[in-house]
Amino acid sequence: MLALAPDSSSQRSARAAASPRLWLVTGFAEPSALWGECRGSSAAAGGPGQSSTAPYRTVVDLSGPAYRCSCPSRKIPCKHALALLLLWSQGQVPDGTPPEWAATWLSGRAERAGRPGTATGGEPADPAAAERRAEQRASRVAAGMAELDQWLRDQVRQGLAATPRAGYRHWDTIAARMVDAQASGLAERLRSLAAVPHSGAGWESRLLEEYAMLRLLATAYRRHAELPPALTDTVRSRIGFTVRQADVLAGGEHVTDRWQVLARRDLETERIRTRRTWLRGTGTGRYALILSFAASGESFDASPTVGTEAALELAFYPGAVPLRALIVTSAVAGGPGQFSADARPGQPPSGGSVADLLAGWARVLSQDPWLESWPAVLSGVTPVRTPVPGLAGPDGAMLPLHPGAADQWPLFALSGGAPLTLAAEWTPRGLWPLTAWDETGQVVAL
């Protein structure tokens, strides 16, 4: 492995970084996928009161070998890739399922090379070994769920008075345990709780709500044999089990329609950017969420333009409330994952009322209580500043804006006090506006 290093200094740095305590998570999947998250330099020290950096995400395709790392080094391979290879060669990397950021890069390489049987598509090279790994992971996750349940009990028993002074280490410790248990979805959710005690008035209620949802998830996983199959898929997804794109394309529900591109929202977590694109079928009225990913500093693949529409066939991921989908084929372009070449400007979408949105939200929550956002199209709503920033329907019904979106001056400027058609994400903390159409039909991405 060290022979792959570009110079002797990289060899020395790789040996120093090849310590399991520096790696938050590592994993290997047949036949050639290797990945891990390594603490940044300031995080590695781990001293009290020291700042921490986002972990460096490293992925290796052993068939090349080829490497990808989010660190700023220009050496190929960098010390993190070499350290990960050293850990793997020493048998210190467990089997697992690639997280989405690694799977996206691996699948892109596989598609360009035309290789079957990779970590994101095709059949595993050794089905028996894959089954053993699945059983081992199920055992680890079950142990992690039991530990999380006890941790949640401890938090409630001790009370919340000292929580604002607990610091990030309080959350990172249990999140790291979930990473060890291969429950990465829970780890991300636990880390996000660190901001709740500093989120303003009412944080206590919001934190208890999050604890309750985590407890419900742990209980649901423990009793998953009693759940309907669709809800089991949802529980597994929330915990961090991934579904291969090949399985979605082969076994997911396929829906062909003419799809309107309602809205788009870009989010950045650590060093990965996520683009959420919302579609709605003109014939079925069904919503779909298309996700795409890019490393920090890189551009996304070609994405559909908000306000257009095109004929597409989508394949939906399994779940109690199927929203996320893959583009299978387009009527004209015909390429997997590509938006149709016949995309053209569409008419403003027809929207519902505030009451329609809340009724739909109640319905989907009864099916997936962990849902964090829901697409909404509202007609005839007017942005208002008082008593709180929000939207007023023609019948006087009100919806608050999400605190993070309360200062969206383009929304108020576009309206000028007149009603709008609005596409947005509804969340438990309020509405996040994404796209607006004025009375002339002009579309504006907010």
Image: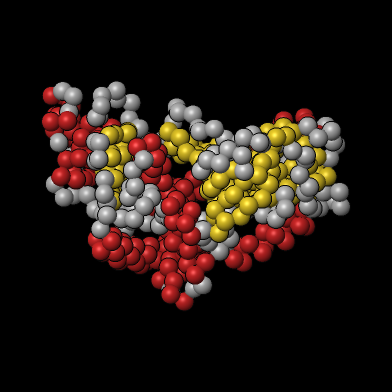
Q: Residue 75's spot in the image, x, y percent?
A: 25, 24
Q: Can residue 206 be seen?
A: no
> Splitting the image into 4 quarters, where does residue 174 fall?
bottom left
> Splitting the image into 4 quarters, where does residue 406 fall?
top right
Q: Is residue 107 left or right of residue 30?
A: right
Q: Is residue 92 left or right of residue 107?
A: left
Residue at the farthest bottom position: 226
Please report the residue visible at 76 percent of the width from the left and 57 percent of the height from the top: 356
Check the image and tell me how it is coloured: secondary structure
Q: Is residue 58 left or right of residue 243?
A: left
So how many labels did they put on this image? 0
> Splitting the image into 4 quarters, where does residue 239 fall?
bottom left
Q: Can residue 364 be seen?
A: yes
Please report the residue visible at 38 percent of the width from the left and 50 percent of the height from the top: 121
Q: Residue 444's spot in the image, x, y percent?
A: 72, 32
Please report the residue visible at 66 percent of the width from the left and 41 percent of the height from the top: 310
Nearest to the observer: residue 64 or residue 270: 64
Q: Residue 148's spot in the image, x, y percent?
A: 38, 62
Please report the residue visible at 67 percent of the width from the left and 59 percent of the height from the top: 361
Q: Residue 64's spot in the image, x, y percent?
A: 25, 36
Nearest to the observer: residue 392 or residue 414: 414
Quarter the N terminus occupies: top left
Q: Is residue 317 left or right of residue 4?
A: right
Quarter the C terminus occupies: top right
Nearest to the observer: residue 249 or residue 269: 249
Nearest to the observer: residue 103 or residue 245: 245
Please tell me whether residue 189 is drawn above or below residue 265 in the rendered image: below
